[in-house]
Image (tube, rainbow, N blue to C red):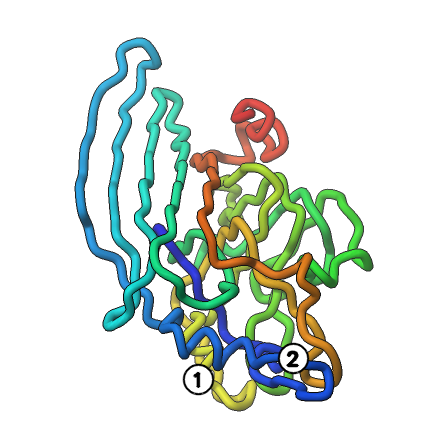
Amino acid sequence: MKEGNFWRAPTDNDQIGQEEFSTRSEEKAWEASGVHMLQQRLVDFKSELSAEKDSVLITVTKKISPPGFNWGFKTSIKYEIAHTGIVTVKVDGKKFGEGSITLPKIGLQFYLKKAFDQVDWYGRGPGESYVDSKLANRVGRWSAPVKELFTPYVVPQENGNRTDVKWVSLTTESGAGLLAAGDLFNFSAHHYTTEILENARHTIDLAEQDFIEFNLDHQQNGLGSASCGPGVLEKYELKNDDFEFFFHVGGFSKREISPNSLWKRMR
């Protein structure tokens, strides 16, 4: 698991700036500050038993910053492992230095076995949505295989995000898998990595992997419309600033409990 994931495959809108609309190229601004090169360095690691909660608490302290730049985040990631098997991940990031005005995203990234390709979620759907382009999707319970979460743009780029999600599960055909829940969040799941999407020039360049890249995002920068008009409205920008978020993650089987019922137990 990548405990601090900030990069997305730039969209057409991220790449283009429109002078007539005073719109900057987000990708150039991010790369000028080294956002695409953020690296993690372990600072401290602690573990303790809690008899009162019957759980284990692991605290990981990291410094996340791009090499050669004097900015980044001092982060604390706390894992509380309950006797039920539910893991609560709490992430707290304190910014230091300047850096870019915005960030592409803030979240966690997992690699899962390819068999976990059945996705259920409660949030906006059934199509992709982002903070500034989501109202065409209804809030409800949705299901789709991973391959159907992909949006095949002619030029591969960030795609397939789902917003305002309360819980999401990825399971095998037999129903075994994991569920993630939290405050309203974003998720995406693909057979392609972020790097593959970023480097491909056409869909024919995409090589399907033997695993699933699963992104749980606290927030994403808006999309805007810089390829043909204004950029991201300020209220939809993801500011480069302090952050904190949490997720509950747990293994389960649909044969024993529904994702929605497990989510209610996690709350």
Q: Which mark is residue 33?
A: none
Name the residue at 36% across, 23% down: 82
Question: Where residue 214 sits in the image (x, y, percent)?
Answer: 47, 57
Tell which circle, 2 or 1, labels the residue nearer the N-terminal end: 2
Instruction: Give the image quarter of residue 79.
Output: top left
Q: Determine whether the residue tagged by mark 2 lies in a helix, strand or loop.
A: loop
Question: Where residue 229 sits in the image (x, y, percent)?
Answer: 75, 82
Mark 2 Cα-neighbour bin, 10 Å: few <14, some 14–19, many ≥20: some
Mark 1 Cα-neighbour bin, 10 Å: few <14, some 14–19, many ≥20: some
Quick check: 154 left or right of 81?
A: right
* Amino acid type of the residue that numbered disc 1 sits on in the rendered structure: Asn
Closer to us: 196 or 227: 227
Question: Where residue 227 sits in the image (x, y, percent)?
Answer: 68, 84
Mark 2 in CB contact with mark 1 (< 8 angstroms): no
Q: Is residue 257 above or below residue 44?
A: above
Q: Is residue 32 above or below residue 119?
A: below
Question: Marks 2/1: CA distance?
Answer: 24 Å
Q: Which mark is residue 199?
A: 1
Q: Which mark is residue 23?
A: 2
Q: Is residue 92 above or below residue 226?
A: above
Name the residue at 35% across, 50% down: 3
Of circles 2 and 1, which is in front? 2
Name the residue at 58% across, 37% down: 183
Quick check: 2 left or right of 202?
A: left
Q: Is residue 230 above or below residue 133?
A: below
Is residue 112 in sight in this rendering? no
